Amino acid sequence: MPKSRVRTKKVYTPPADMRPQERTAAAKKKPSPTWVPITALVLIVVGIGWLVTYYLSGGLFPIGTWGYWNLAIGFAALVASLVVLSRWR
């Protein structure tokens, strides 16, 4: 079997000053302000606290006349925390 020919021509690489600047989208974005994780943490604590208070009080607290809407408020706080955390970089 004959031996295959070895490539003699070198691969061209442009000089470093001719290459375009590579910047990713993550490098262009600034870090998020400090209020973002703090707000998310507060919303998580409020949401869980609201739900635990509702269950442990047998539906009398935080606001007894709202009934099952207390569950909606607690879960809405948790969902709002997820929305805030999605903005965190």
Image: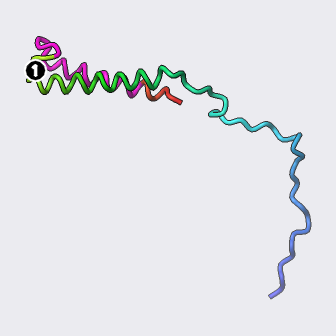
| SS type, badge 1 | loop
Position of the C terminus, as image quadrant, is top right
Q: Give the extent of the magenta segment.
A: 62-83
Position of the N terminus, as image quadrant, is bottom right
**Residue 54 included in the magenta stretch of the image:** no
Residue drawn at (33%, 26%), measured in percent from left and top? Answer: 44
In the shown orientation, is residue 60 left or right of residue 7?
A: left
**Residue 77 included in the magenta stretch of the image:** yes
- On the image, the x and y values in percent for residue 52 come to 19, 27
Up the image or down, 65 lies above or below 53; here it is: above
Q: Which colour scheme is used?
A: rainbow
In the shown orientation, is residue 21 left or right of residue 26?
A: right
Q: Would you identify the image quadrant in which residue 51 lies?
A: top left
Query: 35 or 29: nearer the eye?
Result: 35
Q: Would you identify the image quadrant in which residue 50 lies?
A: top left
Residue drawn at (84%, 41%), measured in percent from left and top? Answer: 19
Residue type of the residue flagged with mark 1: Gly
Residue drawn at (44%, 28%), measured in percent from left and top? Answer: 85
Residue drawn at (11%, 11%), measured in percent from left and top? Answer: 65
- On the image, the x and y values in percent for residue 39 come to 41, 21
* Residue that numbered label 1 is attached to: 59
Main SS of the magenta segment?
A: helix
